[in-house]
Structure formats: structure tokens, C-alpha cells
Amino acid sequence: MKFNTKTIHGGQQPDAAYGAVMPPIYQTSTFAQATPGGHKGYEYARSGNPTRHALENAFASIENGTHGLAFSSGLAAIDTILKLLKHGDEVISTNDLYGGTYRLFTKIFENFGVKFHFIGMQNAKDIENYINDKTKLIWVETPTNPMLNIIDIVATVNIAKAHNVLLAVDNTFATPYLQRPLDFGADIVMHSATKYLGGHSDLVMGALIVKDKELADRLYFIQNASGAICGPQDAFLALRGIKTLHIRMQRHCENGKAVAEYLAKHPKIENVYWPGFETHPNHAIAITQMRGFGGMVSFTTKGNNYDEAIKIVEHLKVFTLAESLGGVESLAGHPASMTHASIPKAEREKIGVVDSLIRLSVGIEDEDDLIADLKQAIEVQ
Ligand code: P1T
């Protein structure tokens, strides 16, 4: 099956009971047993639920994995990966990453004796400087949030394999429509399904996808033992969202390009971060591992003035000022005070998250309306 068919049919079958084309929402916490252990595949809904299971199959299908797991949030999915580790283990992570992931690593898992190295991975060879026999996980976001750096997945896979270290890729910004890390040899793909997979800003969810049964079993054990599963209603919504992922992503890519090109020409704008520009430092890698550049665009204003950036985001009308991304509607955010506020200012600024940085999640509205909205907000007196 090709990708555009998988988004609709991948891992799905009409419901066995009545042939419902969409999986029913099994809103139940438990399942009857004829005799202890004599059940029909499900016993307690933390351990498994048919609606969630249908979604997990869809996750596996679109990422070319063999096993998917659905969680109550993206961070719950990341938390599960980190629980594969133990005291004394080390992790090498991209230094440009979602602030909440950074907070989970540094404020929770450091307390349990896991050590993190946050490094720029644009030159994958640099990872080797931090690998030692305690290194158990390489954590990669690509494109990164919010600077839209691109990390070379194949080069990172080669390093991870040479040192027998797990490689997890947060594929939230790209989605499997644009990039499939398991195909390149990554061990785990993670999503904040809250974003493009759900696609309609109406749920919070996480996903893990792997293609190795033993790793799937270990992750499932942690999911069941820790309990951060998603509910059946959200599973249903995510399944519905995934069915249009391919057509939404096409429009996100088109509108993202139009917005990035508009901003790049605007005299009040200093830098525009979008991997589709030939001048983007990692453009050459992007074209080898992505089939498009997505709908995320970040930019700074000339003079790098905090108040001016705040004024711009406050004056946007079609773009909504809000955390999150990846829905059909356009959103704007100010990373330094919103999504990345949990990263200390000095660390933030080293990677480019300066006071005037604005991050756009370009939606699928009419591109003329999006550009007119940006124009009026940027040019407001
Ligand atoms: O919000 P949650 O579903 O728990 O997912 C966390 C997460 C993980 N990885 C990436 C790349 C993310 O962007 C996020 C969540 N990000 C936002 C809420 C945001 O506005 O950037």
C-alpha cells in the first residue's frame, strides 16, 4: 500500500461485530471474562482497548513500523522511552528541542541519575565526542522545535548502530508524510499526535512506533505499568485526523513556502528559518530525507526587540496566538515566553531562541489571507 492509501486504510478493518467502517468508540474500562483469563483479547482498558488498538495499528502502518503505541500525550510517550533507562545511563540529545522535552529530561530524569548531553547535531560526527559506554539513547528532533534545524538521520543511525545505542526520532514536525525515520534505520519514532497526526487541535496524544518486537514489548510493558494511555474518544478522533494527513500536509507545505518567502522579502524581518530555502544550512540534508518542508516557519525581526515581537503576535487576527502547532488553523507563538520558557535564557539564546523569535504553524487556510494578516501585524505602528 502506498502512503496516501495507508493514511485511510492502514491497519484498519471493518469492525467485526457489524461492519462499522470506522472503529467504534469502546467506551469501557473493562471486558467480561467467561472464566478467569477467558476473554476475547481485551481484559482491562489500560492494557488494551479495541479503539486504541485500531489507532496503534494505523500509527505503525503510516510510519512503516510493526508496532504502535498510543499515549495520553507526547510527553507521556517520551517519558516511556526514558523509562527504558536506569540510573547512571547517559543520553545525547539535540540542544534545540521542545521546551517540555527539555524540562522532562532535566527536571525529572536527571533526578533519577540519568545524564543528558545537549548538543548541536547538525554535524552528526559531533555526537561521537559524547558517546561512551554509558550512552544508551540518542534523542533527535528533526526538524527541531523551534529553529527548524535538520539533523541527518542516516548519519545519526550509523553512529548509533556502531556504538549499539538506541536512536529515537521525534517526528512531530515532519510527520510520516514528509519523513519516515524507521526506513532510515532509527529504532523508535515518537510523535506528539496532538499536532499534525490529530490535525484539528482537538486532542492531546502521543505515539511511539518501532519495528522490533522485543523493543515493542519493553515499551508496552512500561506503558501498561505506568499507565499513560490515551482514551478511546481521543483514539477515534486521531484515527479520523490521520485519514486526511496527506492532503493536509500538501497544503501545509504550500502555505509554509508562501509564508516563508513572503517574510524573507519583508524589510522589517531579519531571519527566516525554513528548511526549504537553499540558503538554509541543512537544506542539502533536508532534500535527501524529506519530501517537502512542512508548515513550520520561525522568524526574527530587525533589531531583535522583545516588545515589537509581542506587538506582532498580539495583532495577528487569522493566526491565533497559542501554544501548539500542526492543526488546520494557523497558530503563532513566542517561544522565549511560551513553549521554550522552561529552557534557561542563556541556553535558549545560544541556539537562536532570542527575544524577537516568532514561530508560526502555518495552517491550511487561503494563503492570501495568511500573508495579509502577517503584513498588517508586522507593519502595525
Ligand atoms: O504536548 P504533547 O502532546 O505532550 O507533546 C510534547 C511535544 C513533543 N515533541 C515536540 C516536537 C513538540 O512540539 C511537543 C509539544 N509542543 C508544543 C506544545 C509546542 O507548541 O511546541
Image: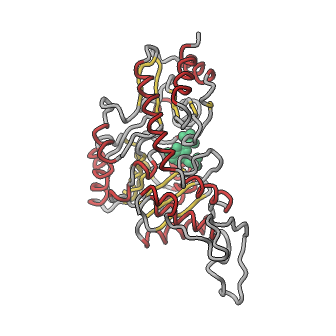
Instruction: Give residue 247's position: percent from left, percent from top.
Output: 49, 47
Q: Residue at x 34, y 43 (%)?
A: 121
Q: Which of the 4 image quadrants contains residue 33?
A: bottom right
Q: Nearer the viewer, residue 305 or 272?
A: 272
Is 87 situated left or right of 184 in this image?
right
Determine whether 254 is above or below 110 in the image: above
Residue 185 shows up from this direction: yes
Q: Residue at x 31, y 46 (%)?
A: 152
Determine whether 72 is above or below 371 in the image: below
Is 124 situated left or right of 149 in this image?
left
Q: How is the image coloured?
A: secondary structure
Instruction: Give residue 135's position: percent from left, percent from top.
Output: 37, 56
Determine whether 361 is above or below 316 in the image: below
For the N terminus, the image quarter is bottom left
Residue 100 shows up from this direction: no
Instruction: Give residue 332's position: percent from left, percent from top.
Output: 57, 31
Q: Nearer the viewer, residue 131 or 281?
A: 281
Instruction: Give residue 252's position: percent from left, percent from top.
Output: 48, 39
Is 121 situated left or right of 25 in this image?
left
Determine whether 344 is above or below 211 in the image: above
> On the rendering, which quadrant does ligand 1 occupy?
top right
| In the image, farthest residue toward the bottom | 35
